[in-house]
Amino acid sequence: MLSPELPFFNDPEGRGLPAGLPCVIDSHVHVFPDAVFEAVRNWFDTHAWQIRYRDTSDNLIRFLLDRGVAHVVALQYAHKPGIARELNDYMAGLCRMFQGKVTGMATVFPGEEGAADILTQAFDRGLGGVKLHLHVQCFDMDSPHMDEICAVCAAHGKPMVVHAGREPKSDHYRCDPYKLCRADKVAGVLTRFPDLKFCVPHLGFDEISAYQSLMSAHVNLWLDTAMVLTDYFPAHTRPDLRAFPLDRVMYGSDFPNIPYAWDRELKWLADAGFSESELAGLTWQNAQRFFSLRDIG
């Protein structure tokens, strides 16, 4: 459960990647226009944790690239109908600014008028897939609106990143994530669109075992690690990554919306005893395959 009492860690941060890491792609980085970013930060300050990194989207991307991250996958989401085109234009501009170092994901509000055209236009402008967030957008994954978005992505060979996990829950969302965000609903999408690459962030926390089973049954399901390997949220144990198919798990930070050092998760990965090939898969090769990236590494 989100709460303003969640801690803020003033832990030390590195000036570069931790020793021993190969190439790194951060598959989960948030960007927004300044006014939207400010609203997001205000919401977190009031209802969740204090965000540590506060700057413009372009400066935040530079922060990661300057510290050795090879490529950034940039995510945003439309919290209401009618703003997706503007957000997608903004994202396309960031991608142009960083010329091959940033893959921008499109957004759309499920059910809004012209959703399919909004996505087609975004893909034509070079955006690399779609990000949706059920906690904020409050839609049903079993709805025709979701199927419309999935169908457009599948037709264009574009992946989807969907915050479909139940946590972190908050009473201040407009909807109850525990009603909308269930692993069985994700299973329905995976079954209806078996050729669609579909990523659930945060390892599907808190339905870890359900997502382990889903990954065995559906080869089009991927997960990212954002915020789950950092010992931040209360949990009995850190999830065992080897319980998942490691070739479909990819590193993501949730930067900049984090209350601790940017490299906290990378430090853990570097010291966790993974083989060289396992670590390369987790930190960049799996993301390269999921997002169909070239010239990385």
Image: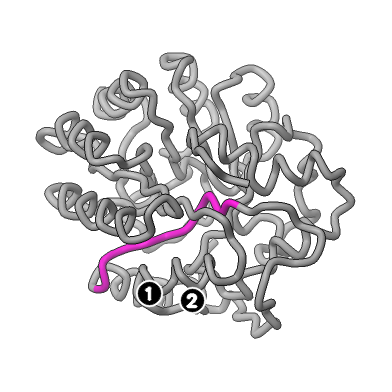
Q: Which mark is residue 51?
A: 2
Residue 267 lies in magenta, yes or no?
Answer: no
Separation of marks 2 and 1 at Cα, in angstroms: 7 Å
Instruction: Say whether residue 174 is left or right of residue 291.
Output: left
Q: Quadrant of residue 217?
A: top right
Residue 43 lies, in percent from the top left, at: 36, 72
Residue 13 lies, in percent from the top left, at: 67, 79
Give the residues in magenta: 25-34
In this rendered view, identify the residue nearer to me: 172 or 40.
40
In this rendered view, identify the residue nearer to me: 114 or 238.
114
- Disc 1 marks which amino acid? Arg
User: Does residue 30 lie above or below 239 as drawn?
Assistant: below
Instruction: Say whether residue 252 is left or right of residue 46.
Output: right
Instruction: Say whether residue 160 is left or right of residue 8.
Output: left
Say which residue appears at 48% left-offset and 43% top-offset: 178
Residue 206, can we see it?
no
In this rendered view, identify the residue nearer to me: 124 or 9.
124
